[in-house]
Amino acid sequence: MELTKFGHACVRLERDGRRLVIDPGGLTSEDALAGADAVLITHEHFDHFSPEKLAAALAANPALRVWTNESVARAFDGDPARVHVVGEGDTFTANGFEIRAYGRWHAELHPDIPRVPNVGYLIDEAVFHPGDALTVPDVAVRTLLLPVHGPWSRVADLIDWVREVKPERAIGVHDGALNSLGVTMLGNFLGEQGPAPTGAPYVHLAPGHSQTVS
């Protein structure tokens, strides 16, 4: 598969001419959805879910289908026949990609702030996008998409999570609020070369850049 990173938390997976897009939110460029017939949404926060952007994509492409949790599905004003509700433990096929859903809740920001539902996706037993959670799948993960920055995250937790998941590689996402200094600083912690090694190579992709994953 070819993995292409778009703004902030969004990635596109492409194989044999088929495209799957995950979390094309409000910080994602419009071209992320070009040519895609399947979209996965992890949760309702604006940086992962844009109702307007998704509605426009569905109107432009009659073949496009969406898979997400019940909370997002309720918030979307569109054809319910094209928006499929999934939750932890569900398995399904989206545009030829085999997917398993993991997790139930967004990571805690603060005890006073209510948590929202969040579901992560393991695609083709290879790539895991957790959304905004540090869910540990019960199977081996080859490529872990690592949410490197957010109001809920700590470097210590990220290091421990990568160690627990034991992926073959980690690719950074959820970094739209970081400047170049922040990207470099976190990159120095989140890999085999860090002062507390995670055990997995870490890669940072700039928006629009791609990497082949298997």
Image: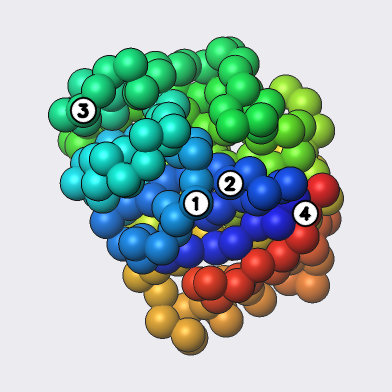
Q: Which mark is residue 19?
A: 2
Instruction: Tell how many labels.
Output: 4
Earlier in the chain: of badge 4 and badge 1, it is 1
Percent x, y of residue 106: 38, 34
Earlier in the chain: of badge 2 and badge 1, it is 2
- Amino acid type at circle 3 is Gly
Question: Is label 3 in a helix, a strand or a loop?
Answer: loop
Q: Is residue 136 visible?
A: no
| Amino acid type shown at disc 4 | Val
Question: In the rendered image of this protein, does residue 115 appear above or below residue 60?
Answer: above
Mark 4 near mark 2, Cβ–Cβ under 8 Å?
no
Mark 1–mark 3 Cα distance, whole angstroms, equals 20 Å
Q: Residues within 10 Å of mark 3 (few under 14, many from 20)?
A: some
Name the side, left or right, on which 108 lies relative to 190.
Answer: left
The reply to whether callout 2 and callout 3 are in contact (CB within 8 Å) is no
Q: CA distance from mark 2 to mark 3?
A: 21 Å
Q: As shown in the figure, which amino acid type bears the numbered disc 2? A: Arg
Mark 4 or 1: the one toward you: 1
Where's residue 88, x and y in %?
52, 17
